[in-house]
Amino acid sequence: MRDIFDRIIENKGPLGKWASQAEGYFVFPKLEGPISNRMKFQGKEVITWSINDYLGLANLPEIKKIDGDTAAEYGAAYPMGARMMSGHTEFHEQLEQECAAFVDKEAAYLLNFGYQGIMSAIDALVHKDDIIVYDVDCHACIIDGVRLHMGKRFTFKHNDIESLEVNLERATKMAEQTGGGILVISEGVFGMRGQQGKLKEIVALKKKYSFRLLVDDAHGFGTLGKTGAGAGQEQGVQDDIDVYFATFAKSMASIGAFLAADKEIIDYLKYNLRSQMFAKSLPMTYVKGALKRLDMLRTMPELKEKLWENVNALQNGLKERGFDIGTTTSCVTPVYLNGSIPEAMALVKDLRENYGIFCSIVVYPVIPKGLILLRMIPTATHTLEDIAITLDAFSGIRERLENGTYKRLSAAVAAAMGE
């Protein structure tokens, strides 16, 4: 019999094999100081483009005050226990009501953590006879949720409505045999490429096919739509989203999440969502903090306006300089370059050490081999000076990538890894 640890020791995985070269710098880096447009990395100030604090709430004095005051009043533990047993308060109810109203839904249910919350929601919404059809580029939390499903599931090509329809036809035939239904899953904004999900086109297919639609709008909530209610509002189809999910971890600069839908659906989820039924309630610090943050989203449109001023300046500047930023239709700003993983490591080190720019690097297996993705998250705290410096830095690293500088610098690493 084989020891299950043998495989782990022999094969660290596509990312794990780079641990000795990457850990502590390229992965698991330590950013220090107040969350802002400029932070410290290894003792040096860097312009940070990797923080999902879209509206710049994290370090505002009024936010830090409500967080501190609530922690001082309630501590870190209250309320203790799961919501169903002992962890329920009037403030949890208030937050649910305000979240539902903000995204134009009848009811909402508060989640203690976004990743496990949407996993559990998928598990609760479908039965073994049902079929799931989901975008192939959906976030890992959705993929993990789909893995819990004991019935059939199909993927459709990313944002490809023709592919979706082919799979809806397959799912419809299968559902007629099993007696089940169909759940379609997409994202409001795909966090890696920045494209909005084609929600309007997906909704239009409801006239031809019978299905329910679940949308993960983690990156759209607070950033898109007239009031910040997200991608559904932006595309004019919020009413047609059957189950809406958003997290507090991005625009709200906090922890927690919520589901919003018709009251009958939310009532069902309250009694069947295992990740909430059997886990501790969201602590009061985060609940009252979220109420304050949501109020700022409602009453301070200038935060979103400043965010989009920066988004437009950065994305337009990159395009004017000939950079490939894909087809983003959100704040997420990807920059695509051609190069190997060792070249990417040399490039990012240069960017951080010599240009003072910190942004996330994405390579194979997340994206195809030979591509380097520098993923940037503009926020309301960035300045036009930050953007100008960053644009000049990107022009500099592109030149060094194209003239072979990074290939020479990374030759030893490439040889050691067999690249």
Image: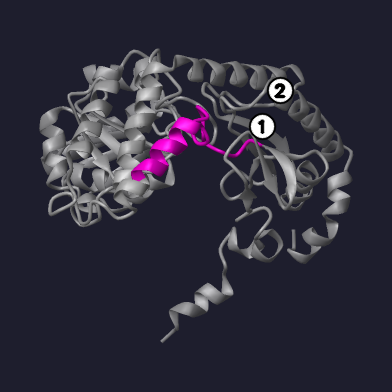
Residue holding disc 2:
318
Q: Is residue 81 above or below residue 326?
A: below
Callout count = 2
Q: Quadrant of residue 97?
A: top left
In x, y percent, where is residue 1?
41, 87
Could you tell me which residue is drawn at 57 percent across and 40 percent down?
A: 35
Amino acid at pointer 1 = Val
Could you tell me which residue is drawn at 59 percent across and 42 percent down?
A: 34
Left or right, 384 with respect to 217, comes to right
Q: Quadrant of the C terminus?
A: bottom right
The residue segment tinted magenta is: 48-70
Dot 1 falls on a residue whose secondary structure is strand
- Magenta stretch contains residue 288: no
Residue holding disc 1:
335
Q: Earlier in the sequence, mark 2 or mark 1?
A: 2
Could you tell me which residue is drawn at 40 percent across and 34 percent down?
A: 218
Q: Quadrant of residue 404?
A: top right
In x, y percent, where is residue 39?
66, 41
Color encoding of the figure: one colour
Circles 2 and 1, Cβ within 8 Å, touching? The answer is: yes
Q: Which mark is residue 201?
A: none
Dot 2 falls on a residue whose secondary structure is helix
Amino acid at pointer 2 = Leu
Left or right, 123 with respect to 1, comes to left
139 or 108: nearer the viewer: 108
Task: Tell me if I can see residue 371 in this picture.
Answer: yes
Mark 2 burial class by Cα count in 10 Å: few <14, some 14-19, many 20+: many
Q: Is residue 300 above or below residue 121?
A: above
Could you tell me which residue is drawn at 77 percent across and 48 percent down?
A: 349
